[in-house]
Amino acid sequence: MRFSLLIRHLTVGLGALGVGSVFWLGRLNWDPEMRLWRAVGDASLVLLVVALAAGPMARLWSGACPLLGWRRETGIWFGVLAAVHSALVWHGWARWDVPRPSWGMSSSPSSVASLVSSPALESLT
């Protein structure tokens, strides 16, 4: 049983590496460090979608039932890649500095920060 579990994790891990490589190669004109962050983050999101969509897909289409047995491994590898993505961004972009002004989406016009400070919302108070 343990050997089978190891093979399943290796399969999902190598699949995640393949998906991440596709994302890596899709952004050749980006800075290599930023490209790595995005490739790992995008690969983790693909694994999340697969893990979450397996149940409803199996319910709607019986051909997707074999995916149900792989949800645990896919979810674990999603968590691993998401943690690696977070660490890479935290180390490479934020430089371990929490109050950095350009952190996150705070400079984006569509962010929650700009919504909270909008004049339309101030008139409601």
Image (tube, rainbow, N blue to C red):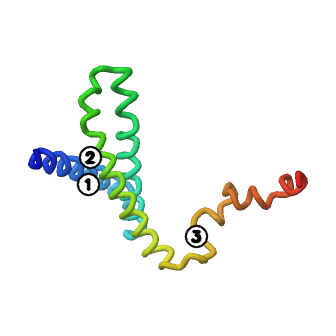
Q: Quadrant of the N terminus?
A: top left
Inter-mark Cα distance, 3 to 2: 32 Å
Classify residue 108 by image quadrant: bottom right
Secondary structure of the residue carrying numbered label 1: helix
Mark 1 to mark 3 CA distance (whole Å) = 28 Å
Q: SS at mark 2?
A: helix
Residue 73: which disc?
2
Tell me the residue at 61%/62% (across/down). 105
Q: Which residue is mark 1?
A: 17
Residue 121 in the figure: left or right of residue 43: right
Residue found at the very far front of the displayed protein:
1
Instruction: Please name the residue that numbered disc 3 is placed on.
Output: 103
Q: Is residue 24 left or right of residue 121?
A: left
Q: Name the front one of labels 3 and 2.
A: 2
Residue type marked 3: Trp
* Placement of 95 over or under 66, stated as above or below: below
Q: Can I make out residue 30 in this image? A: no
Whether residue 16 is situated above or below residue 59 in the rendered picture: below
Between the residue at mark 1 and the residue at mark 2, the CA separation in whole angstroms equals 14 Å
Residue mark closest to the camera, 1 vs 2: 2
Number of marks: 3
Labelled disc at residue 65 = none
Name the residue at 24% across, 35% down: 69
